[in-house]
Amino acid sequence: MPLALLALTIGAFGIGMTEFAVMGLLPDVAAGFGVSIPMAGYATTLYALGVVVGAPLTTVLGTRITRKQMLMLLMGLFVVGNLLTAVAPVFAVMLAGRIVSSFAHGAFFGIGSLVAADLVAPHKRAGAISMMFAGLTVANVVGVPFGTLLAQQINWRATFVAIAVLGVLGFLGVARLVPAQPVKAAAPMGQEIAVFRNPQVGLAMLMTVLGFGGVFAAVTYLASMMTEVAGFAPSSVVWLTAVFGLGMVGGNLVSGRFTDRHMMPMLLVSLVGLALSLAAFSFAAHDKAAATVTVALIGAFGFATVPPLQKRIMDQAAAAPTLASVGNIAAFNFGNALASWLGGIVIAAGLGLTAPNWVGVGMTVLALGVAVLAGALERRGGRGDRSGADERSDRVVASGAGAAAGAGSGAAVGSTEEEAAAAVRG
């Protein structure tokens, strides 16, 4: 494993911790600022919306610097946001800090995916992407419980200081370990936007919104289901979250290995497994042992969708992948917000605390239908299981990595559109 991947993983760990740890800190945050729990929940909601808005915005603003420089800038922004959250004198400033932090999230994972792909051979790209995303999954196993413990022993502000320290480590790791890259001519923004005219790009992002969103329909209300339906004590939520996180780690890493060879079959298997797990959870939630196993399966199948979903968007937008890759990270978060909102609606309608699981099933089944449609369109175009975009992307990555170990943050993966065409011809 290239050491540069370790730097990306550390950054991903910090971002994962700041995204998820706040859920366990809401009572402390509410008490500290004298606001209600629902009001404190805006610390989560605004973060997700900040990712959706900030991901493409920060990417566009960084199109004239290298990917390494952009990653360093994003880590710096991440540190500032978390420090602002930690020292906030009033709730409004705390929310501002959360928004600043969120602006680093989408662009870091989107651009980091491209950098990770450039660090390895073309046939190992999905594995490299999953290794970076492992930082996000491990954050749920180690970071979130640690953050909760730190808040209990000191205060919630100490948790965000610790997260800021992780951001500093990520910044130093990127500066020291990610290969230096010459500033190359960035792909014109019109070219970056043009890739969205490809129907497969839109279908890939729709899969992301629906497929991964299904996970959060259930997970957002996990604590309530486990305590009020399964009968666990509130103190058990910490280790139950860790069980979910372990499933996430396993599913992500296994999927990364298989996605390199069988991307669409891996995606289809993950979505089917996720739909079945969510459906089963509606019944298993009434038994402690069954609920625990099902939570792990939801984490495993849910995050098994991440490598194929992210790799597919990169393949389909091979000529100018940066904005599309970052946009797909925003799509993950939009799906999370949509699923949580729909889950809240069905609970408010009196359908019970397990009803969000069926929202997740519906979203996942729709994602499966979109995946089948995308595959059928590819076959109709004569591309077979392996898309022409996938083949073109591998050639471009190989060419670009040999020439310059990556391009600027707004450039294609190792080439401009003309270089990409030349790589295909060659």
Image (cartoon, rainbow, N blue to C red):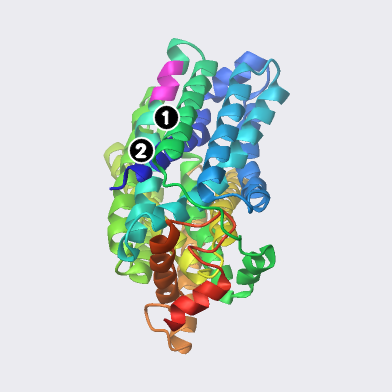
Q: Please give the residue where the numbered disc 1 appears in the rendered image.
A: 144
Which corner quadrant of the image does residue 241 belong to? top left
Q: Nearer the viewer, residue 302 or 118?
A: 118
In 3D space, how far apart are the residues under numbered discs 2 and 1 (Cα atoms)? Answer: 9 Å
Q: Which residue is mark 2?
A: 138
Q: Do the numbered discs 2 and 1 sit on residues whose CB atoms are within 8 Å?
A: no
Report the amino acid beneath label 1.
Val
Magenta residues (range): 146-150
Give the vertical position of 319 relative to 279 (above or below): below
Q: Say whether residue 164 is visible.
A: yes
State whether the magenta stretch is mostly helix, strand or loop.
helix
Local packing at callout 2 (Cα closer than 10 Å; few below 14, some 14-19, many 20+) is: many
Residue 280 at least partly seen: no
User: Disc 2 marks which amino acid?
Assistant: Val
Q: Which mark is residue 206?
A: none
Q: Residue 407 versus residue 265: which sits nearer the camera?
A: 407
Residue 219 position within the rendered picture, expressed as x and y whole percent measured from the top left: 46, 43
Q: Residue 322: percent from the left, percent from the top?
A: 56, 59
Residue 366's x, y, as percent?
51, 67
Magenta includes 426? no
